[in-house]
Image (cartoon, grey):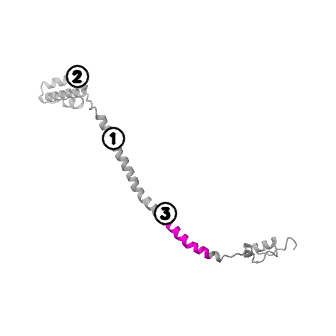
Amino acid sequence: MSDNHILHLLDERPLSSLTATELGQITAHNANCDTCSSAYEAAQIAFALLQERSAVSVEPSPFFQTRVMAAIREKNQEKEADGILKFWQAAKALLTSMAAVVVLLTTLTIYTANTSSTEVSESSLSFNSDPAEAVIYGRANFDEVEITNSDALSDIYGIDLEDSDGK
């Protein structure tokens, strides 16, 4: 039985889950094998230490929750401040370009308003005061002759029609 060591039984499962037959095999083997006997004793000591340690409940210090919550709050505030700072850094270029466009458009508006006011006054002097009918029909005097429908249609479509009025 000295060739059949019990180390595999100790390594497979914890001591609390070993059956009565397995514990009997271990006890019988430990009587003849010093190596397995010391391994079994070490497993028993480790099991006892784990049982004692798991039985003890560790209470956190009274201010543990306060310190943890303060650290979390501080970390969140740093992230929030970093987020606002990143937003303004990204928006800085946009706002600067928008301000430059506003200044440029204002300057152009003022400059063109000053120069175009003189041009408008000069162009208003050369304004053609003929009525639209005179330009379209090529007649200067509309008071003497009234335009008939056939005159309008012949001017629009370029065909000669008889007077529908009989004139």
Q: Quadrant of residue 30?
A: top left
How many other residues sit within 10 Å of disc 1, few (<14), some (14-19) or many (≥20)?
few
Q: Name the residue under label 3.
A: 102
In primary-sequence order, the first of circles 2 and 3 is 2
Residue 94 among those drawn in magenta: no
User: How far across and how far down the image is residue 108, in percent?
Assistant: 51, 68
Q: In which quarter of the image is the N terminus?
A: top left
Which numbered circle lies on residue 72?
A: 1
Q: Which amino acid does label 2 sit on?
A: Thr
Spatial separation of the CA atoms under disc 3 and disc 1: 44 Å
The correct choice, above or below, for 56 with respect to 113 in the image is above
Q: Which of 134/162 is in front?
A: 134
Q: Are marks 2 and 3 in contact (CB under 8 Å)?
A: no
Q: What residue type is labelled 3?
A: Val
What is the span of residues highlighted in magenta in the rendered image?
Answer: 104-122
User: How far across and how far down the image is residue 102, in percent?
Assistant: 48, 63
Q: Mark 2 points at which residue?
A: 21
Who's the residue at 38% across and 50% down the image? 83
Q: Which of 147/12 is in front?
A: 147
Image depth: mark 1 or mark 2 in front: 1
Q: What secondary structure prevails in the magenta region?
A: helix
Image depth: mark 2 or mark 3 in front: 3
Spatial separation of the CA atoms under disc 2 and disc 3: 93 Å
User: How far across and how far down the image is residue 121, in percent?
Assistant: 61, 74
Q: Which amino acid does label 1 sit on?
A: Ile
In primary-sequence order, the first of circles 1 and 2 is 2
